[in-house]
């Protein structure tokens, strides 16, 4: 386990993932009933943007920093507000010195009655998380494999909430591990909201995951196609060499209105965060019907 998220904190991929996460929290808060957030691959919760790791190749400068600095039309500002509120809450004044990971986005936005369950396999990172949230009664940290944990922790007693599955993609079979976890999780909790993050790197494996998941959900779980949403962003040509060019999420059981909010946000993000030719975005539901790969199966 060599992956350290500190090198990437606040980059374009984090901005999209955390904007979706933050919007989901806001929708869940529309009802008074408490909900649970489960983060299978939690990281360390909060990232110091002045650290050696973050400064080595400051990806946040082309991510969250650009988003904060840019002029935003009203609908984009509204879609980004929950995430930017969480970013502001961990910084003092105007300076951007810290960026919230998914646990901290949750801690900033969730209510005293809601619950946060974090799994992190790296022992040092799990300890950091544990110390960070030691005084927060809403948070439970477990130093364990988040995929395996799903079997015992789903469904949550609250019967409402959200699971984020955000693995490091160090292993070449990670997409297959995530697919297996998706089936375990959704078999145990078919009405939960699930966010699956994946890089747009091995495009065949990613498409196979997306389409396979959508087809399985529709055929086996009778989930309507419009309850499967895909949101992707790429900041330069996906075929270009070098650093990660694109990433996004598959959201199962997305909150009502998330698609409309992302429709406002994604084109703006693609323009604001572009790093070269060929930047773009896509937002779609019903991918099992549309996908080219379906013909190949
Ligand atoms: C991409 S980072 C998570 C970032 C975090 N979700 C965020 O958005 O701020 C992936 C994390 O998963 C951890 N990890 C790797 N394999 C794991 C597993 N099987 N179970 C739980 N954590 C794992 C890594 O140590 C790393 O901290």
Image: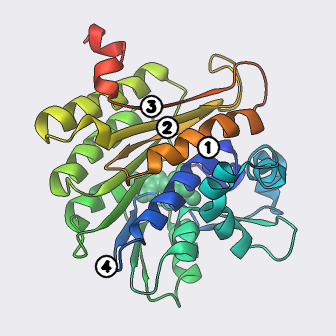
Q: Which mark is residue 42?
A: none
Q: Position of residue 121 (x, y in %)?
A: 44, 61
Q: Which mark is residue 265?
A: 1
Q: Earlier in the sequence, mark 2 or mark 3?
A: 3
Q: Nearer the viewer, residue 122 or 195?
A: 195
Q: Earlier in the sequence, mark 2 or mark 4?
A: 4
Determine which residue is flagged by label 3.
172
Find the distance from the CA under tag 1 to the CA under tag 4. 28 Å
The quadrant in which residue 237 appears is: top right
The kind of secondary structure element at disc 4 is: loop
Q: Nearer the viewer, mark 4 or mark 3?
A: 4
Q: Is residue 96 left or right of residue 115?
A: right
Q: Residue at x 33, y 34 (%)?
A: 176
Q: Residue at x 45, y 59 (%)?
A: 24
Determine which residue is flagged by label 4.
33
Find the distance from the CA under tag 4 to the CA under tag 3. 40 Å
Determine which residue is flagged by label 2.
231
Label 2 environment density (alpha carbons within 10 Å; few <14, some 14–19, many ≥20): many
Q: Nearer the viewer, residue 227 or 139?
A: 227
Q: Residue at x 43, y 19 (%)?
A: 204
């Amino acid at each position: 386990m060599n992956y350290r998220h500190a090198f990437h904190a606040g980059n374009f991929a984090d901005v999209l993932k955390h904007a979706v996460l933050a919007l989901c929290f806001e929708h869940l808060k529309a009802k008074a009933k408490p909900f649970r957030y489960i983060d299978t691959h939690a990281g360390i919760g909060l990232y110091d943007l002045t650290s050696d790791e973050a400064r080595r190749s400051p990806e946040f400068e082309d991510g969250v920093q650009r988003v904060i600095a840019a002029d935003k039309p009203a609908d984009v500002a509204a879609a980004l507000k929950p995430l930017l509120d969480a970013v502001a809450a961990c910084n003092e004044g105007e300076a951007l010195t810290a960026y919230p990971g998914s646990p901290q986005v949750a801690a900033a936005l969730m209510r005293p009655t809601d619950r946060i369950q974090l799994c992190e396999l790296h022992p040092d990172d799990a300890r950091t998380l544990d110390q960070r949230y030691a005084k927060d009664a809403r948070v439970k940290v477990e130093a364990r494999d988040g995929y395996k944990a799903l079997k015992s922790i789903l469904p949550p007693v609250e019967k409402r909430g959200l699971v984020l599955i955000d693995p490091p993609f160090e292993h070449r079979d990670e997409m297959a591990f995530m697919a297996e976890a998706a089936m375990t999780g959704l078999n145990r909790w078919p009405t939960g909201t699930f966010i699956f993050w994946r890089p747009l790197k091995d495009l065949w494996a990613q498409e196979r995951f997306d389409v396979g998941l959508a087809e399985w959900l529709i055929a086996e779980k009778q989930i309507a196609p419009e309850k499967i949403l895909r949101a992707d962003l790429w900041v330069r040509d996906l075929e270009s060499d070098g650093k990660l060019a694109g990433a996004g999420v598959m959201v199962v059981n997305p909150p009502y209105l998330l698609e409309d909010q992302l429709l406002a946000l994604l084109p703006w993000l693609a323009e604001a965060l572009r790093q070269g030719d060929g930047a773009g975005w896509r937002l779609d539901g019903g991918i099992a019907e549309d996908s080219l790969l379906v013909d190949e199966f």
